[in-house]
């Protein structure tokens, strides 16, 4: 077992992406027995302490079957209609299966824009983290009614990479109908060799990636792209065969299956590096001495109670600079409250904030995970 595979054994937060080709009966309807098997593996991993967000397609195929259509249509708005109908069946099928393991599920429909926009990024991140804390399995699909990236490009792969960034996943598992990434197309070249491990950033891998099949539009190209996206939060990626009935367990056991795409950096570190490089600060908050110590010495989050004054205009999710009494920058991070709200809640306790704003976004102005010390 390589050192990297060994490390996977200790991971605790995964994103698993299952594409249409694996879940559906030739594009028409869901294969419930297959779905059952994924669910049983995920439930087992959950029992071992691994939190999992599932990214699953299959809505269009289920919709095509529910609407009684003979084949998948070519017109985008019909595909969107099928996705809207089929999403009900997809999520219902998962719910029924997970109930057998006493697991609640949650439906999350996302678009790439939701993740690019900082405020919505924070919203999605907080709700997903809350669901994970509650032991719920979030099931993500692209919101095909308002976006058609997956319908057009098979981009649930990239969406899965973005979800990995969102929740700081340690591992992204992309399941496919191939054993992993080969150095040639195994369907036509019998000498094609499986690449067991490579760096996600290795540009030469692109030359090995072909296009997707007719059901799942993904193919290796979008999977490599997803691994590069995942790398930004220090997430490792495994591309592996969904036809192996115990593939998730094998991956969790550190077995050499599929293609492991490694990243150099640890997850939180990668994010903090990104924060450190952001030159565009939208505002400044001045901290009292207690808050400075809490941040610098005790590794704590920044609470509104420790803030003395606010300067500049900023929105939720933007980056603010944290300075001490003397105006020296000591930290920066993503704020949970905009500048108007921050001015209202400075110096206040959580209870007072709730009374003032009617509701509470988060206890912290800046959560520790979204903050770097300068
Ligand atoms: N997100 C869609 C689904 O769940 C699209 C996949 C596809 O194009 O087949 O089915």
Image (cartoon, rainbow, N blue to C red):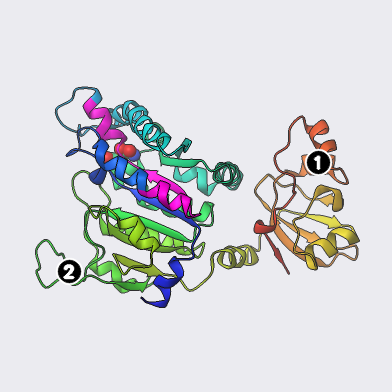
Question: Does 33 sit left or right of 354 as displayed?
Answer: left
The crowding category of the residue bearing disc 2, from other C-alpha atoms within 10 Å (few below 14, some 14 to 19, many at least 20), is some
Question: Does 75 sit left or right of 134 as displayed?
Answer: left
The crowding category of the residue bearing disc 1, from other C-alpha atoms within 10 Å (few below 14, some 14 to 19, many at least 20), is some
Q: Quadrant of ligand 1?
A: top left
User: Is residue 155 visible in the rendered structure shown here?
Assistant: no
For the residues bearing labels 2 and 1, Cβ distance under 8 angstroms: no
> Which picture quadrant has residue 204?
bottom left
Name, please, the residue furthest toward the top: 67
The numbered disc on residue 184 is 2
> Which picture quadrant has residue 8?
bottom left
Q: Which residue is depicted at the point 34% across and 73% down?
A: 198
Image location of residue 191, percent across then percent down = 11, 73
Q: Nearer the viewer, mark 2 or mark 1?
A: 1
User: Is residue 367 visible in the rendered structure shown here?
Assistant: yes
Q: Is 47 or 177 nearer to us in this picture?
A: 47
Image location of residue 82, percent across then percent down = 29, 28
Question: Does 318 sit left or right of 327 as displayed?
Answer: left
Asked if the residue at label 1 sits under 8 Å from ligand 1, the reply is no
Task: Classify 232 as above or below 303.
Answer: below
Look at the numbered disc 1 and give the secondary structure of its residue.
helix
Look at the numbered disc 2 and give the secondary structure of its residue.
loop
The numbered disc on residue 350 is 1
Image quarter (top left, top right, bottom left or bottom right) of the C terminus: bottom right
Q: Which residues are magenta?
A: 41-65
Image location of residue 367, percent across then percent down = 70, 53
- Is residue 276 in the magenta section? no
Image location of residue 132, percent across then percent down = 54, 45
Q: Is 289 or 249 nearer to us in this picture?
A: 249
- Is residue 43 in the magenta section? yes
């Amino acid at each position: 077992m390589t050192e990297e595979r060994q490390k996977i054994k200790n991971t605790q937060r995964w994103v698993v992406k299952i594409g249409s080709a694996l879940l559906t009966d030739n594009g028409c309807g869901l294969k419930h027995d297959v779905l059952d098997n994924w669910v049983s593996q995920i439930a087992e991993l959950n029992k071992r302490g691994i939190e999992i967000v599932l990214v699953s397609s299959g809505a269009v195929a289920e919709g095509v079957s529910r609407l009684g259509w003979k084949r998948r249509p070519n017109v985008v708005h019909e595909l969107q209609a099928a996705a809207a109908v089929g999403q009900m069946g997809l999520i219902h099928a998962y719910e029924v299966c997970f109930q057998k393991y006493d697991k609640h599920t949650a439906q999350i429909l996302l678009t790439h824009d939701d993740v690019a926009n900082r405020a919505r990024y924070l919203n999605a991140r907080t709700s997903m983290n809350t669901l994970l804390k509650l032991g719920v399995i979030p099931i993500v699909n692209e919101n095909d009614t308002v976006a058609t990236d997956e319908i057009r490009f098979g981009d649930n792969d990239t969406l899965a990479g973005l979800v990995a960034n969102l929740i700081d996943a340690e591992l992204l598992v992309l399941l496919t109908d191939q054993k992993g990434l080969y150095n040639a197309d195994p369907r036509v070249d019998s000498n094609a060799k499986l690449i067991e491990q490579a760096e996600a950033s290795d540009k030469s891998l692109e030359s090995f990636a072909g296009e997707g099949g007719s059901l799942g539009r993904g193919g290796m190209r979008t999977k490599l792209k997803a691994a590069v996206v995942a790398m930004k939060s220090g997430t490792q990626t495994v591309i592996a065969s969904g036809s192996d009935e115990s593939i998730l367990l094998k991956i969790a056991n550190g077995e050499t299956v599929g293609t492991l795409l490694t990243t150099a950096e640890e997850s939180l570190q990668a994010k903090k590096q990104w924060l450190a490089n952001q030159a565009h600060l939208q505002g400044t908050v001045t901290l009292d001495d207690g808050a400075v110590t809490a941040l610098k010495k005790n590794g704590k989050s920044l609470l509104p109670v420790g803030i003395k004054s606010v300067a500049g205009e900023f929105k939720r999710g933007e980056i603010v600079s944290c300075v001490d009494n003397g105006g020296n920058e000591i930290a920066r991070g993503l704020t949970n409250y905009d500048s108007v709200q921050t001015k209202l809640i400075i110096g206040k306790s959580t209870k007072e904030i709730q009374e003032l704003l009617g509701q509470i976004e988060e206890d912290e102005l800046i959560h520790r995970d979204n903050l770097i010390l300068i």
